[in-house]
Amino acid sequence: MPPHLKHFLPKAFWIAGLALVFLLLYAPILSAVLFSFSADRFPSLDMSGFSTQWYAQVLTDRAMLEALGNSLTVAAITALIATALGFAAAYADYRFRFFGQKAVLALALLPPTVPLVILGLAMLAFFSRIGIAGTLMAVVAAHVVIAAPFAMAICRLRLAQLDETLETAAQNLGAQPHSALARIVLPHTLPAILAAFLITFAVSFDEYVIAWFTGGLNETIPVAVLTTLQGQVDPTIHVIGTMSFSVTLTLVLIALAVVLSQSGGAMSKEET
Amino acid sequence: MTAPAIPARTSLRRFLFNRAWRALWVLPLPVWLLLFFAVPLGLLVAISFWSVVNYRLTPDATLSAWRYVLGLDFLWASFWRSYSLSMASAVAISLLAFPASYAMAFVAAPRQRLILLGLAIAPFFTSYLVRIYSWQVFLTEGGVISSVVQALGGKGESLLNTYFALFLGHATLALPVVLILQTIALANVDRTGISAAANLGARPAAILFRVILPAARPGLALGLLFAFLLSYAEFVSAAYLGGGAFQTLPILVTDLVRAGQQWPRAAVVALLMIASLLVTAFLTVLWAYREKG
């Protein structure tokens, strides 16, 4: 930034605004972690003591462990497929000029803008017709739709930094298309592929609307939380929350560290 | 000069190989999206013209679901409530995020900005439901906020079932996205324009309102649009923080399907939502890229 930019309001105002937003974002997360260790059933500021009883309760709850298994299965398969499809689409857009390229790009960016309630409704209708409603595979098929655009965007961002002539040069020197891809493009894109895998995993692991609509009796963790929310106060939600936060925050922060450290220069003009 | 037979054949093979190689990369995502995204949405459009006979969904070509839903007074009440609440949230979230985005774009050093952006976006991917449940703990009677207010001498009533609670839910969902879009928009404002205005003696207020804001308008508008889109589609805050005091369209859709098997009617409501979203998106983009008058 230009050092001589005079701010309209004092610096402290803008920094206070930043602090307020971070407080709003992280207060619910920190409070869930705090109360997950509370000895009381009803969370309040005067905690009577520290306890891990709710953790013990969650870890011995068979329904919850089953939901965790479902979540991990769905998220892992979703992340694999979504990353593969996302990378393929990003590479196709980078490498080739083909008919309908813009239309494909638009189609790929559309799913995140459609309300999940509507997607869930449409997919439940469709899956019931083809007879796979209520299975985990239905949830995977739907989650890939909402996760793949993230994977595509991450991979495309990284590919934009690769000199387009390198691959052609390799092919002119006699390299087959696949070996040029394997030796030049893949190593360059690998961090982005890893980041895409982690982000898509997190997207699927946290998604509850579509999983609730299409999963039937196969509950995932967020769907189990949704069902619990409808009941009364239940401290185990804080435990599940703390465990989910540690999993997804770790995945996402690793992914972001990878993406941001490599595309930082591309993000704004003045950093050259 | 004559083309020998063998090279012609190898070039045909090469041509076919190239085609197949290209299709291998181009096709998978569009095919998946057509099958599991476009077809289901198309089916939803079709279902809005179907009928329910003896509790069974039957293919048909009737406008009865459309007539029924469009004639419901409480649907329109619900539609305008949803729309205005989400728009209010979107404006408020944008205003709330702006000082923070400004700080990240103009106060923080580039390296700090990346770290802050990372920390801002990370919650977007983490247990939204648990965070909503956490807000319940803050807002409820005898909860964190009311204890603090009581300690300060206030009454400390429950804040649940108020618009403030609903807004907090919307903000929890949309803030990360709005922060990213605003910060990128602000950070990409041409610095030489800012310096030029300053050198020509423009006051800080003029620099902000007449140089920075107009230049960042597309990104700021996109942030507003996404905040609206996310708030409009969200139903957990409305159900659990708003306490059912705010009957919104997404709640209506789930009720129609879960309770009454009224698929065609639910489809009509869903399509109305999509139509209103498209109109809003179109108007916002028009406004974002409008020439300066």
Image (cartoon, rainbow, N blue to C red):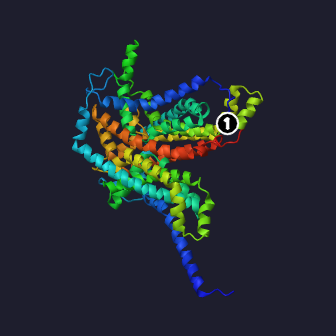
**Which amino acid, by three-letter code, is at mark 1?**
Pro
Q: Nearer the viewer, residue A73 or A222?
A: A73
Residue at 51 percent of width and 57 percent of height: A187
x and y, in percent, of residue A191 in the image: 49, 51
Q: Nearer the viewer, residue B110 or B191?
A: B110
x and y, in percent, of residue A111 in the image: 48, 51
Q: Residue A145 falls in which quadrant of the image?
A: bottom left
x and y, in percent, of residue A263 in the image: 56, 46
Q: How many neighbours does mark 1 have within 10 angstroms: few (below 14), some (14-19), or many (20 or more)?
A: some
Q: Nearer the viewer, residue A28 or B161?
A: A28
Query: In this orientation, does residue A75 appear?
Result: yes
> Looking at the picture, does residue A56 appear above or below residue A10?
below
The residue labelled by disc 1 is: B214
Chain designation of label 1: B
Query: In this orientation, does residue B269 appear?
Result: no
The local secondary structure at tag 1 comes to helix
Q: Nearer the viewer, residue A109 or A132?
A: A109
Q: Residue B291 falls in which quadrant of the image?
A: top right
Outermost residue to the top: B153
x and y, in percent, of residue B238 in the image: 40, 35
On the rendered image, what quadrant is the C terminus of chain B found in?
top right
| Side of B136 relative to B283 (left or right) | left
Residue at 30 percent of width and 46 percent of height: A68
| Side of B175 relative to A7 (left or right) | left
Q: Residue A51 falls in which quadrant of the image?
A: top left
